[in-house]
Image (cartoon, rainbow, N blue to C red):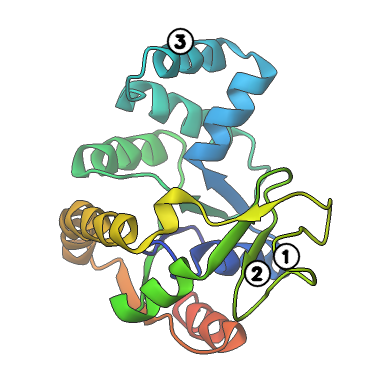
């Protein structure tokens, strides 16, 4: 079962992906991770990506699709979770062509639904270690010592994009960018919208129900 996972910032998409990887043996394909790994490993595609990003430009669809194709080629028979791609209808069409060439299918498009007021609470409470990147939450998972990372002792701070005004902008941008994609996949009878509120395990059960 190959899936595309949608979710606004703070919806728990990363948590659900981790559970699917851990319990179902799926492979996580995130374009952000692909960019970073390709740059770090100095692959031919990675050098092109670095050049584009160093110029302050967006990575082209063609280059992104090439990186996704490399990831799909290394699946080794595992099911995959697509995260962060496609972001536009044009990319969705490119993905469809790519999957067809490799005799693969996209079986479900899962969209996690969480009310904006709940997302605001989750995101404004988020804190991150400046040194190692460990994530905390002022209510759900505070560090043992305020402002100090449990893992490395680094400074724990609130990111600029986790402030209320920035979050509102991010949520609006997410909604406007994903609306056409949801319509695209709904037309193809692949879209499943899932309640993303409540305990992590309860949300995971809802996700699994749509994968059977």
Q: Where is residue 199 in the image (x, y as percent from the top left)?
A: 56, 88
Q: Position of residue 195 (x, y in %)?
A: 38, 84
Contact flag, marks 1 and 2 (Cβ < 8 Å): yes
| Residue at 20% in and 37% down | 90
| Residue at 54% in and 65% down | 126
**Could you tell me how far apart the alpha carbons at marks 3 and 2 are, in whole angstroms?**
34 Å
Contact flag, marks 1 and 3 (Cβ < 8 Å): no
Judged left or right of residue 67, residue 76 is right
Give neighbour class at mark 3: few <14, some 14-19, many 20+ (Cα, 10 Å): some
| Depth order, front residue of 83/128 | 128
Judged left or right of residue 48, residue 25 is right
Q: Name the residue under label 3.
A: 51
Q: Mark 2 points at which residue?
A: 19
Judged left or right of residue 153, residue 83 is left
- Going from the N terminus, do you reach mark 1 or mark 3 first? 1
Q: Find numbered disc 2 in the image and state the secondary structure of the residue it sits on.
A: helix
**Could you tell me how far apart the alpha carbons at marks 1 and 3 are, in whole angstroms?**
34 Å
Residue 20 vertical placement versus 176 (above, below): below
Q: Residue 22 carries which label?
A: 1
Residue 160 vertical placement versus 2 (above, below): above
Q: Find numbered disc 3 in the image and state the secondary structure of the residue it sits on.
A: helix
Give neighbour class at mark 1: few <14, some 14-19, many 20+ (Cα, 10 Å): few
Q: Find numbered disc 1 in the image and state the secondary structure of the residue it sits on.
A: helix
């Amino acid at each position: 079962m190959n899936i595309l996972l949608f979710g606004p910032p703070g919806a728990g998409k990363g948590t659900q992906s981790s559970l699917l990887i851990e319990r179902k043996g799926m492979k996580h394909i995130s374009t952000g991770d692909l960019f970073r790994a390709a740059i770090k490993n100095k692959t031919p595609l990675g050098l092109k990506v670095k050049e584009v990003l160093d110029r302050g430009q967006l990575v082209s669809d063609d280059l992104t699709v090439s990186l996704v194709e490399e990831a799909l080629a290394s699946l080794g028979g595992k099911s995959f979770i697509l995260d962060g791609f496609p972001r536009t209808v044009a990319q969705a069409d490119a993905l469809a062509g790519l999957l067809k060439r490799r005799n693969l299918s996209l079986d479900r498009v899962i969209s996690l639904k969480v009310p904006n007021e709940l997302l605001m609470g989750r995101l404004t409470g988020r804190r991150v270690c400046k040194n190692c990147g460990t994530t905390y939450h002022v209510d759900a998972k505070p560090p043992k010592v305020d402002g100090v990372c449990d893992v490395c002792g680094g400074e724990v701070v609130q990111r600029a994009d986790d402030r209320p005004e920035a979050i509102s902008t991010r949520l609006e941008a997410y909604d406007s960018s994903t609306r056409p994609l949801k319509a695209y996949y709904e037309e193809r009878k692949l879209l499943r919208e899932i309640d993303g509120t409540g305990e992590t395990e309860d949300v995971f059960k809802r996700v699994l129900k749509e994968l059977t």
